[in-house]
Amino acid sequence: MAMVNLTINNQKVSVEEGRTILDAANKLKIKIPTLCHLDLENIKFVNQSASCRVCVVEVEGRRNLAPSCSTPVSEGMVVTTNSIRCIKARRTMVELLLSNHPKDCLICQKSLDCELQALAAELNIREIKFDGERARHEIDISSQSIVRNMDKCILCRRCETMCNEVQTVHVLSPVNRGFDTFIAPSLNLPMNESTCTFCGQCVAVCPTAALTEVNNISKVWDALNDKTKYVVVQTAPAVRAALGEEFGAEPGTSVTGKMVAGLRKLGFDNVFDTDFAADLTIMEEATEFIHRLQHGGKLPILTSCCPGWVKFFEHQFSDMLDIPSTSKSPHEMFGVIAKTYYANKIGIDPQDMYVVSVMPCLAKKYEAARPELAHDDMQDVDTVITTRELAKMLKEANIDLMSLEDEDFDNPLGESTGASVIFGTTGGVIEAALRTAYEWLTEETLEKVEFHELRGFDGIKEAVIKINDLDVKIAVAHGLGNARRLLEQIRDGKATYHAIEIMACPGGCIGGGGQPYHHGNMAYLQKRMECIYKEDEGKTIRKSHENPYIIKLYEEFLGEPYGEKAHKLLHTHYVKRVKM
């Protein structure tokens, strides 16, 4: 590729043709403030709306200031980023944004995580110079997952890029024009009436509190302080790879033992691991896959662990509802087992048991309320909080996570294998299923349990695994845009597979909408992924069907995998939803 030479702040630099001034400045480690810009490097998407004009710079020979995030470099270009003209322009743009923004920073859900707040402090803005009419909108609290507060929107268009280009859900778009513009679903519908999947990727990239998660912390505190309730908590595999970031740890630091200790200090009666239920999920999904394979069932089978993905195909591919596995997601399987098998084991009335899930995901909040995920007039899971919400609870209770001594999960629902841990990253579910399906089909021991071709950040990954005389074709997609491309190829007869894993969020659960904010630094996801695989490698048992507590659960309670009782408790059905 041709290189372009330019000068920035009297420093010479060469970058590839087609790059922007901002890219060139970053190469020189010259910081240019940005707000609307978002470079999702690992998934190769850039938000270049250039709507905020905070990153303006002077370009020699040009009359107007240029937005560095969207202005391509040219040979011999001379740029100044820190002139008084640039600084004054940036301050004015931020002051104008603040003039149309609520002044409730002290109680705002994004306080100290708000990029507008941080930028105002960086530019030393200590007063609002512009006063006048401010846009006001009704807050949308219709869904169980996402709160939409357009009073705090700065029209950066990040959410649009994520929803429309990355995820291809096409829910969010501008309504009205000029001062009256705001971002909303089609026809300005409330979120719960739209085709939103509640993946939360819009929340993950929103620089302010225009989009936030529904906060369930008070529900958990109420349950913990209710003496009539026996409160148990489960934690998803991706949580342990990111929670430490909220307490100053390096991204990718595993805090499994410290997390368990912190949850006990919060007052939970039992601290369990969703990984146990991930092993249970593999028992059901792998058996379902083998059953379809051997009895002429519908293929490919699609994994069904991700509720954002489930709602996506219910809206977008409702003609293919017979393809996904009917297995519930791990945290839902855990909920039903806790309120049946475990409640009976410890002599607790299931109505008195309260199950809390700590998830990296906003769609799990929606999923827990789905009517089909209930039994005996009880939801399988009572409340879902995110990784961020757990961090807030620990801080509220003055618990310093990183200073805690490691503790172990409670049993019998706390023992897990390496196969369950890798559920937290893209490719992990299908890899875990293959470890079990391979041994069951071949009746041979799988010595090398890693399937490296299913790992990494490629949007769509493919592999062919030899099992007996059959070449099993596997595909993995993460991000709903990649899922759409993959399913359209299958629908059109252009691709055939035996099994497919799909995760709604880029990177899988490690990049979930409820994880600590990465502020566009996608390197965080890589480090979280490495943490997950390291946990897998450190496990003594690395295949789900070898988990002794899972074996005991089937012997004592469930019978056989994919059997009558297992199907009644651990499987579900899907709903055809409107496509807009």
Image: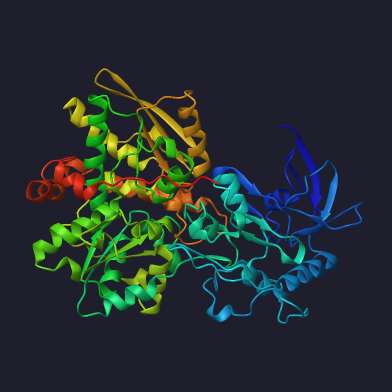
Residue 329 shows in this picture: yes
The percent coordinates of residue 319 (x first, y second) are 43, 36
* Quadrant of the image occupied by residue 258: bottom left
The residue nearer to you, when weighing 197 against 401, is 197
The percent coordinates of residue 385 (x first, y second) are 38, 65
Residue lying farthest top?
469
Q: How is the image coloured?
A: rainbow
Left or right: 396, with 376 as reference point? right
Q: Residue at x 29, y 42 (%)?
A: 326
Residue lying farthest left?
556
Please tell me how many numbered marks the rendered image carries. Answer: 0
Q: Quadrant of the N terminus?
A: top right
The residue nearer to you, when weighing 148 against 450, is 148
* Quadrant of the image occupied by residue 343: bottom left
Left or right: 487, with 417 as reference point? right
The percent coordinates of residue 469 (x first, y second) are 26, 17
The percent coordinates of residue 339 (x first, y second) are 19, 61
* Quadrant of the image occupied by residue 98: bottom right
Left or right: 5, with 534 as reference point? right
Q: Looking at the image, is 83 positioned above or below residue 508?
A: below
Residue 458 shows in this picture: no
